[in-house]
Structure formats: structure tokens, C-alpha cells
Amino acid sequence: MLNFVGLNNELLTIRNSLRSIHSIRKFEINSKRIMQASSSPGISRTVIWLMAVISGLVVANNYYNQPLLALISDDLHVSETAASRISVLTQIGYALGLLLLIPLGDKFFRKKLILFDLVLVFGSLFWMTFATELWMLYAASLMIGATSVIPQLFVPIAAELSSDKEKSSNIGLVMSGLLLGILLSRFIGGIVGEIWGWRAMFGIAAGLMVIVWLAVYRMLPEMQPNFKGTYRELMRSVAHLAKTQPILRLASFRGAMAFGSMCALFTTLVFHMEKPPFNAGSSVVGSFGLAGAVGALAAAKVGKLQKYLDLNRIILYSLLIVVGSWAFTYFAGETYWGLIVGVILVDLGVQSSHIMNQTNYFLIKSNAVNRLNTVYMVSYFIGGSLGTWLASMAWKWAQWEGVCIVGVSFGLLAIIAHVLFSSKVNQSQS
């Protein structure tokens, strides 16, 4: 009997040991999978290109309205200033979405978060398509901006899964897709608006979001969340990063001022060109997005300049290009060639500084990549909203000359901050 009890105890010990070994092995396998999915450097080129294309399609939702503002103004019998608020509210919505939604990329599975958000994007565009009152357009525009933030979930994915050597290149590719979406959306929006009316553009955009949802569902890899606290704690950590990371604060200010300068141009361009000597429609104004695409494609290669120039010098040159673009826009603003050169240069300068800003703060050793991006991009689009609003006010009181003063002022503020603080920030961080 004692032998039987002893044998039984030994069998129990062996079984428990096997269970422990199995549990340990299972934990190692799961850990390995998690590490491969979210921590290992390297991301397939197919996924990078997918994110670039989707970034362009989604961010375009925020900018279809710009060449259509005159059509909306005529259709609803409202003033140009009232119609321009559609663009302002879209950018404010985008800033709110960046602040409230993007940090969730550290807390939840990003693929599921993106799929859920795309449903909201579709609903917002659908509402915009059939809105009949100005307040409905305002509300729908705010929602379109707040939900079309998916590209800013892609950029941290590209940064997190890329090696330091490939980081600038991969961020640049995704950002190029994003900026091409911004620029080509103006061209496409202008063409569609002139042929089928402004509502058709938002209906087409809603249909494109269905295709994007299917592409994300089938091809985007899932990534593990890296924050386990509450939403309140998550948002507190965003504020903490803004307070404690001087590189992030400087990059955010530079980005906000540069983007505000560009938005001042594109928001009022449609009003400038519908008057003599141009007398141009929305399709002509939208075609300036093609000119801007030249600058965007050139800026995609800016990361390669780091072989020859340090990052801060590249940013300085980029901001000087932004300010210089306004010389063409102002002194040759009554000619097509002057406006085309101005558009190419402002897009080249803004995109180049944008990529370098993001490369700069993504080098901060932190797993809070989405929250770092939140601080920067919220500032970025607050700057864009401010540039849009001030430009619309300047247009009302001083027409094109007032707009140019606003654009130059934003660019100069970015340069002044960069010159005064970039060296100090780098020294404090090293």
C-alpha cells in the first residue's frame, strides 16, 4: 500500500513537471511570436507600400473640400468666409482625433482600432454627401477630420518596426503617400466637383473607405499593445511626454508653423484664382495639387541627405525653402508660373521638415511611439487650423497680400525657434 501511494505521488510529480515544462514552452513560443510581431526590426516592403497608399486615401478626406469651397458657397448661398470654416473645422477635428484617438494605438490592438475607425470615417463621409444645411456640413467636416487619423497610426508602426538605418526611409515613404493624398485630393476634388458637383466627391470617398477596410483586414499585421493603464493614465502620459521631451516640443512647434504656412496658401488659393486675371474654376485650382506632388516626391528622398548634412541643418534649409516660396507667391502671384513655383517649393519645404521632425523625435528611446506622434501631430494640425483661420481673415480684409503676410510670418517663426533652440535642445538631450 505504501509503495502504491509512493508510486502515485511520483506520477503526480512527473505530471506536474511536464505541465510546467509545457507551460514554459508555450510561454516562450507566445513571447517569441509577440517579439517577432512587434519588436523585431524589419518590416516588409509590401506592408510599407500598403500603408503609404492607404495613408494617401484616408488623409485625402480632409482636403477634398478645399477646391470645392466656392461650389459649396454658391450651392448653399453662404459667404466665402462661412464656407472656409468647413476647412477650419476639418483640421480642428483632425487635431482632436489625433489627441483623443491616436494614443489608443499604445493601449489596444492597432489593426482592430483601425478597422473600427474606418467604419466611423465612412459614416462621416456619407453624412457629408447628403447634408443639406451649413451646420450639418460643419458637423460632418468635424467628424471627417476626427476620424481620418489612421495615417498617424501607420507612421509609428513604420518607425517601431524599422531598424535605425531604415527608419527615415520608411517614414518618408509613408509620409510621401500621405502628402500625395493631400495634394492629389485637391486635384481630384476639383475635377469631380466641376463635372458632377461637390457632393459626388464625398460619396466616392465613402466608397473608397470600404475598399480600404477590406485591404486593412486582409493585409495589415497585428501589433501587441504596450500600455496597460487606464485611458486617463494614458492621456496623462501624453502630457508628461510633452513636458519632459524638449526635442519633441521644438519639433512640434516647427511642424505647426510650417504646416500653418502651407494651409494659408491652399485654403485661399481657390478664392484668389476665381478672380481676374485667372477666372479659374475648381478643376484648375485642384490641378495645383499636381504641382505640389513634385515637391512631395522630391522630399521623400530627404532622408538620404543625412549622409552629408546633419539633421538640424536639413531642417533649417527646409524652412528657408518654405519662406522663400512666398516670394514667388507674392511677387508673381498674378501669374500661373509664379503660383506653380510657389506651390512646389512650399510643399517641398514643409514635407522635408516634416519628415526630419518625425525622424528626430522617433529617435527618443521610448515605447510610447503613438503618444510621441500624438503630441507632434496635434500641434501640427493646430498650426494648420490657425494658418487656415488667419488666412481666411486676412483674405477678408487684405485679400492676397494679407494671405502672403500670414504665410511668411508662420515660416519665419519656425526658423526663429529652430535657430534659437535646436542646439540647446540637442545638448540637453545628449
Image: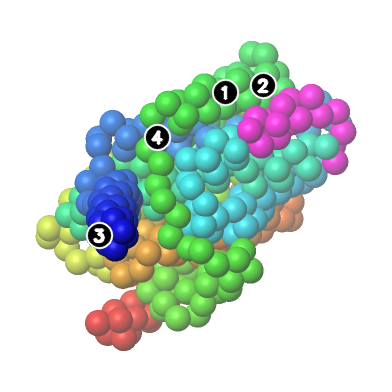
Whichever of callouts 3 and 2 sits on the residue coming sooner in the sequence is: 3
- Of residues 45 and 422, the one nearer the viewer is 45
Compute the Cα span from label 4 to label 2: 25 Å
Q: Which colour scheme is used?
A: rainbow
Q: Position of residue 212 (x, y in %)?
A: 50, 27
Whichever of callouts 4 and 2 sits on the residue coming sooner in the sequence is: 2
- Of residues 96 and 83, the one nearer the viewer is 96
Give the residue type at disc 2: Gly
- Kindly identify the residue that appears in the image at 85 percent across and 28 percent down: 132
Whichever of callouts 3 and 1 sits on the residue coming sooner in the sequence is: 3
Whichever of callouts 4 and 3 sits on the residue coming sooner in the sequence is: 3
Q: Where is residue 176 in the image (x, y as percent from the top left)?
A: 36, 41
The residue at which mark 4 appears reads as 220
Compute the Cα span from label 3 to label 1: 70 Å
- What kind of element bears circle 4? loop
Whichever of callouts 1 and 4 sits on the residue coming sooner in the sequence is: 1
Q: Position of residue 420 (x, y in %)?
A: 38, 81
Give the residue type at disc 3: Asn
The residue at which mark 3 appears reads as 3
- Of residues 228 and 275, the one nearer the viewer is 228
The residue at which mark 2 appears reads as 203
Q: Where is residue 11 in the image (x, y as percent from the top left)?
A: 27, 54
Question: Residue lying farthest front?
Answer: 1
| 1 vs 2, front mark | 1
Give the residue type at disc 4: Leu
The residue at which mark 1 appears reads as 210
Circle on res. 85: none
